Image: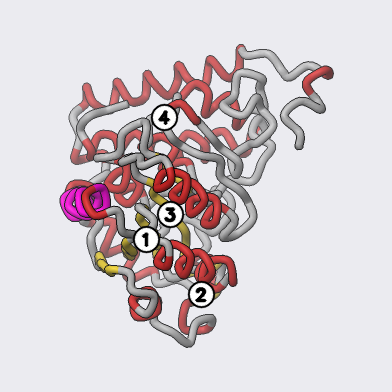
Amino acid sequence: MYKNLRIQGRLIRSVEEKIIELYPKDVIQSPVHLSIGQEAVAVGVCADLTSNDLLFTTYRSHAFYIAKGGDLNAFFAELYGKSTGCCKGKGGSMHLAYKSVGFMGTSAIVSSTIPHAVGAALANKLEKSKNLIVCVFGDGAIEEGVYHESLNFAALHKLPMIFILENNELAVHSKISERQSFNPGVHAKSFGLKVTEIIDCYDPIEIQNILEQIYSDVRKNCMPQWVSIQTFRYMEHVGTGMDFDAGYRNKVKYEKLLKNDVFNKKNFSYSELLQINLDIEAAVNFAIKSPWPIETELFQDVY
């Protein structure tokens, strides 16, 4: 929607803040997993992807939907459960999709989109397509068996895709140290995957610069790669509140990051912020005025 990557990240932040404002009014019925603090990952990952490159991601997907070019009207209409939503109001926050820009369906089932991405990469290889398949998942997903199977299959069959770990070091409230006895990067290397780890990088431009070369390599050599991007979610796992009082997250790190946050309002002009707010308000009004799904649609798109 916006060519400037930092403005695009600010748009995502403002969208999430609008959801925080709307949620207590009960107009959004589905659970919401906000991307505040993690915007740089989504923007950097999507910056050099075309609409023909397919992106598979997790249920914390608002940022990726917007960064990949998903329609903002259809986004808010989906959250409102309206028929004009990107999934006709049937998916809600955790099940977004926008096929025309290559944003494939997300799911509340942890790790479920990883084998879907591998299947798409296999199809690309068989069709000799140079389009990329990018699969983003959280650190909780790498404990599922299908993740290990997918890495093995992609490496064995030399599939042209990129696995991207969006690592906020938490699975709901559980830290990595409580869940994993292995190093994810070392584990990925054991399959023969080329590994890149991006640490303490919260600027989408820097992430884009690193991924640009990786994308080029995968397009040229048609071999899978694995990337880890460290990030930090500001909000609670699910919902619109802060939960530092629960004691499982590092508030000192949060306050440090907040001081240098590239998406802070102070880093943008009045006109930039005004345009973002106008776009969001227009999308919310579109959702409000949109019709509800009709009864005959109840069993459509059900498989």
Q: Residue at x 48, y 87 (%)?
A: 181
What is the secondary structure assignment of the residue under circle 2? Answer: loop
Kindly identify the amino acid type of the residue bearing the numbered disc 4. Val
Q: Secondary structure at mark 3?
A: strand
**Residue picked out by circle 3:** 136
Magenta region, mostly helix, strand or loop? helix
Find out whether residue 114 is within the magenta segment.
no
Q: Which residue is mark 1?
A: 158
Taking the image as shown, residue 290 lies to the left or right of residue 224, namely: right
Estimate how packed mark 4 is, as few (under 14), some (14 to 19) or many (20 or more) residues with alpha carbons within 10 Å. Answer: some
Return the residue at label 2: 247
Q: Residue type at mark 3: give it.
A: Val
Q: Is residue 192 above or below residue 205?
A: below
Q: Position of residue 31 (x, y in %)?
A: 64, 46
Q: Earlier in the sequence, mark 2 or mark 1?
A: 1
Task: Compare marks 4 and 2 and give the one earlier in the sequence.
Answer: 4
Q: Whole-percent x and y of residue 235?
A: 47, 55
3D distance between C-alphas at marks 4 and 1: 25 Å
Q: Nearer the viewer, mark 4 or mark 1?
A: 1
Which mark lies nearer to you, 4 or 2? 4
Residue 245 visible to the viewer: no
Residue where numbered disc 4 is placed = 101
In this picture, which residue range is highlighted in magenta? Answer: 208-219
**How far from the left and from the top, in percent, is residue 149?**
54, 69
Which residue appears farthest toward the bottom when viewing the image? 181
Determine the secondary structure under disc 1: loop
